[in-house]
Image (spheres, rainbow, N blue to C red):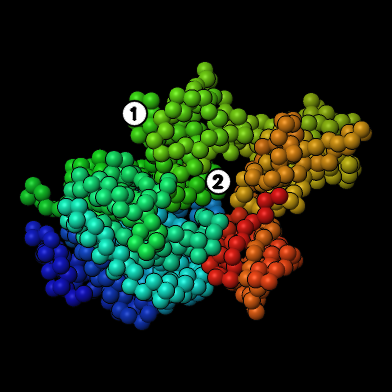
Amino acid sequence: MRQFELIEAVKAYDPTADEALLNKAYVYAMKMHGSQLRASGDPYFAHPIQVAGILTDYKLDTATIVTALLHDVVEDTSATRDDIAEMFGEEIAVLVEGVTKLSRLELQAEHTRQAENLRKFILAISRDVRVLLVKLADRLHNMRTLQYVKPEKRERISRETLEVYAPLGRSIGIHSIASELEELAFEHLNATARTAIMRRLEALKLEHGSAITRVSSEIERVLAEGGLKARVKGREKTPYSIWRKLQRKAVGFSSLSDIYGFRVIVESEDDCYRSLGIIHRIWPMVPDRFKDFISTPKSNNYRSLHTTVIGPAGMKIEMQIRTEAMDRVAEDGVAAHWRYKNQSYGLDREAMQADGGRDPLLNLRHLVQVVEHGEGGEDWVEHAKLEMYLEQVFVFTPKGKLITLPRGGMPLDFAYAVHTDVGDTAVGVKINGELKPMRTALQNGDVVEIIRGSKAEVPTDWRSLTVTGRARSAIRRHIRVSEREEFIRLGRVSLEQTLAQHGKSLKDVTLKAALETLTVATEDDLLDAVGRGRIAVSKVAEILFPALKGQIQGSGERKRLQDSSARLFVRGSGLTPGVSIHFADCCCPVPGDRIVGIHEVVGADGVDTGLTVHTIDCQSLADYADDDTVWRDMQWTPQAETDAMGSVRLHATIQHAPGVLGQVATTIGEAGGNILNLSMSHRQHDFFDVELDVEVKDARHATMIVAALRANPKVDVVDRVRG
C-alpha cells in the first residue's frame, strides 16, 4: 500500500482525518526503519504499512492508523517515546508505548515468566482497546508471513497466537481476525490434521456438489414466500473449527452434523424472529440446538439467533439469523463502532451499548480481575487463557442481574463473579428456587441464589467445584494458608523428633543460626521448607547442634524424604505422612486431569495399601461411593505441569484395511506421542478394536492426540479409557 493509497483509504470513511499527520507518520517510519529487512528479505517498512492497511479495513481513527505506522520504531530504531510525543502528540505516544511494551512481552515457555508477562499484557490492553487492535493487526500480518521464520520460533509464535491473541480477539468480538489467526496457527502447529480435514471437506464437496448454492437459494425462496426479504450466505466451517469439535465431542468426522453453516441476513430484529418461525415450520428443528443471542447477547456484543434444522435433501444445517448491523458487530466486534459523530471520528460507545446493551471491553476488565486475584502465576495463567476461550453460559441473580460464566460454570463460580465475599461465605445454593448440589453445572437462564454462612470458611475440596480463574484463585489462597500451616507443623514435628532421638531439644536453642546459614527470612519459612522437604531436617539439626554432624542417618529422615518424593507431583489436604502414593492403572491420571485420592486400609490386620490417585471420572470410583472416609482431595503440583510424563490408555475401533495401524502410529508420533504398548481384540471382518498405551505430557496432549486420530476416516471411534 503506497502513501497516497493509505491516505485515500482513511479519508474514504473519515473525511476529517488529519492527512498531514498521516503523511508525517508514513515518512518518519520509512526514514527510521531505513534499510532494515524482514526475515522474508522484504524492506521492514512493508510490515507497518500492511498493519495500517489491515486497520483501515476496520475504519479505525487516525490516531490508531498512525500508531500502526509507528508501532515498531521505538522497539527497533533509535526513536524514543519522547521523540514520538514531540512529533505526534501525547495520545499517539501513549498508544505506541503500549504496543511497544506488548512486543517485549513474549510469552516464553518458561512458566513463571510466561505468567508474569501475561499478567502485564492483560493489564496493558485493558487501558485502551486501540493498543490491542494494533497488536492484533500486527500479529495477523506476522502470521501471514510466518513461513519465513525458523521452525522452532514458528511453533512458539503459533501456539501463542492460538492461546492468547485469537481468544483476545474474540473477547472483543473481532471474529474475522480471530478466525484467520486460528487457521494460520493451526496450519503451522498441526499441518497433518489440517490437511486431513481439508481432504474430507473436498470429498464432501464432490459428494454434495453445489449444496451451499442450492440450500442458500432454497432458504431465500422459503422466506420470500413468507413475505420476508433475506440475504443468505452459505459457507463451510473452517478446518480449525472442525478440529475443535473433534476435540470436544467423542465422535468421528462423519458424525459431525454442522459442517455447513448458513447466515440469514434480514432487515429488522422482528424479521429475525419471523424468519425463525417460517424456517421451523418448513424444516424440523434439531432438539437442544436453538440459542437466542438477541435477547441475551454474548459478552462481546454478539447478537444472533442460532438454530439447526433438517433442511433440504435431509441435510443437517446450522443457521444464524441476524440483521446487517448484528452481522457487522459479529465480524468486527468493537471495531464496528468507530464512526463520525459530533464533528469528530472515534469509538461511539453509545451506539456500541445500544447494539448489545453492554460494553464488550468489560471482558478485558474481567480478565484484569483474574489477574488481580491471582497470586501464583503458574496456577492462574492457564485459567486466564481458558476463560478467554471457553463458550459462555448466561445466568441471573434473584434480582435479575445477568452474570456471564464459562460453559460448565458452577455455583461457586457464580458466587465469586458476584463478589469475592459472596464466594468466601458460600455454603449452599438454590437454582430456580430449588436446593441443589454445589457441583451442579449451571445452564442458560438459571436463576441462582447463593446461601451464605456467617464467616469465610472455604473447604479445600471446593476447588474442584469451579472452572473460573477468579474462583480458583480465591479458594487457592485459603488452601495455601492452611497448607502452609500444615507444613509448618510437619516441619516442627520432624525437627523435634530428629533432635529428640539424639537427646537434644528445640527449647535449648533459637533458629537464628539456621536462618542466617540457609538464607531464610523467618522461622515459619524455615519450618515450612523442612515440612515440604525442600530443606533436609538433618541439615537444620546439624547447624543448630554442630556436634551432631554425621550422626543423623536414622529411618525418620529417610522416611520423610520418601514422603516428600511421593508428593512431588500431587498434593492434597489431610495426607498422612508415610502413606505411599501411586497412580491408578484403571484410568492412568496425567497432569491436567481432575484427580481424587482413595486411601484404603484392608484386611483383618489393617494393612495400609497407600493412596491411589484416580481421575475424577474414573468408573472404579463407584466402588467407594458409600465410604466417605477413604476419599482425599488431590491436585497436581506446578512441578507436575512442567516435569512429569505419564501414559494414557486409548481404545479405538478401526476399519480393517491395509496400512491403517501404520497410519495410527504415524498420527500419534506426529502429534508428539509415544506408543508404549498395543493390543488388538474383537477382530471382525470390517473392524477391529485396539488398545494403546501412549506416553503423553499432560491431559491436553492426550486430547490433541485423540482429536488427531478422529480426523482419520479409517478410525471409527477413539476414546480415552476411564476405568
Q: Amino acid at mark 2?
A: Asp
Residue drawn at the location 45% of the way across and 47% of the way down: 387
Dot 2: element: helix
- Residue 35 placement (x, y as % from top left): 30, 79
Q: Locate residue 466 relative to residue 299 in the image: left or right.
A: right
Question: Which one is nearer the viewer's eye here, 103 or 226?
Answer: 226
Q: Residue pushed farthest bottom?
A: 41
Q: Residue pushed farthest right?
A: 605
Q: Give the residue pinned by disc 2.
A: 379
Q: Is residue 389 above or below residue 596?
A: below
Q: Going from the N terminus, do you reach mark 2 or mark 1 first? A: 2
Tell me if residue 389 can be seen.
Answer: yes
Residue drawn at the location 50% of the way across and 61% of the way down: 255
Q: Give the residue pinned by disc 1.
A: 400
Q: CA distance from mark 2 to mark 1?
A: 33 Å
Q: Residue pushed farthest top?
A: 454
Tell me if residue 540 can be seen.
Answer: no
- Residue 679 placement (x, y as % from top left): 75, 66
Residue drawn at the location 39% of the way across and 62% of the way down: 315
- Residue 716 placement (x, y as % from top left): 59, 65
Question: Which one is nearer the viewer's eye here, 267 or 378?
Answer: 267
Question: Which one is nearer the viewer's eye here, 202 or 163?
Answer: 202
